[in-house]
Amino acid sequence: MNRWPILMVLVLLMAGCQSNALLRDYDPGRDFGAYRTWQWQEPAVLYSPDNPRLRSDLTEQRLRDAMLQEMEQRGLRQAAPGQPADLQVQVSLMLDTRIEEFRSLHGGYWGYPWYGPVFQDVRTYEYEVRTVQIDLFDGRDGRLIWRAAREDLPDAGNAHPSERSAALQRSVRALLQYYPPQ
């Protein structure tokens, strides 16, 4: 019995089970221990594309609440209005359409493609990916010093508001788990 087809199916299934991509970058020349306060950089939340399906006051408030909670857990306090802060924070919420193509071969006699005609089946799937990105800028010179981004699948639009809040909270927590960098 030939086990290669079974092995290939298992490899493809395991590749499909990968966790959400987490991308991060930072300036290694910065002393992250010196940053104690933060404030929002205007605009606080950027949307791409800028359309009503993605942009809403409710989403922005959920992101603001999640950032406030996670920054406080890391010992960073929000600066009082009008006061300078060590860090400027900006969050981006992006929605991209991705296309995935799956090909499969079938046909042949007795299940072996080299014993008869083989047909190729191509299926194309289109889906959306949501990316949450957090940028931290130095409050003195305005330069980007830390960035993290995470991709996941957005909800279908029928999620309860508490589920949407929890999903954004999980994304922000996952992004800030690597702040400050070691």
Image (cartoon, rainbow, N blue to C red):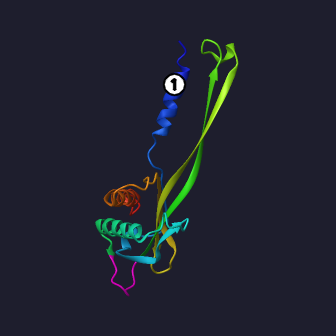
Q: Residue at x 51, y 24 (%)?
A: 7
**As drawn, 140 above or below 20:** below
Asked if one can make out residue 57 in the rendered structure from this viewpoint, the answer is yes
Residue 85 occupies quadrant: bottom left
Q: Is residue 127 above or below residue 83?
A: above
The segment highlighted magenta reads 78-86
Residue 36 falls in image quadrant: bottom left
Q: Is residue 28 visible?
A: no
- Asked if residue 57 lies left or right of residue 125, the reply is left
**In this rendering, position of residue 82 left or right of residue 94:** left
Residue, far right: 117
Quadrant of the image for the C terminus? bottom left
Q: Nearer the viewer, residue 35 or 22?
A: 22
Closer-to-camera residue (153/159): 159
Residue ID at (62%, 23%): 106
Mark 1 highlights which residue?
7
Quadrant in the picture for residue 117: top right
What is the x, y in percent for residue 92?
Answer: 48, 66
| Residues packed near mark 1 inside 10 Å, few (<14), some (14 to 19) or many (20 plus) | few
**Residue drawn 30% across and 67% down?**
69
Query: The disc labelled 1 sits on which kind of residue?
Result: Leu
Residue 79 falls within the magenta-colored stretch: yes
Q: Position of residue 39 (x, y in %)?
A: 39, 77
* Rendering coords of residue 47 (x, y %): 51, 67
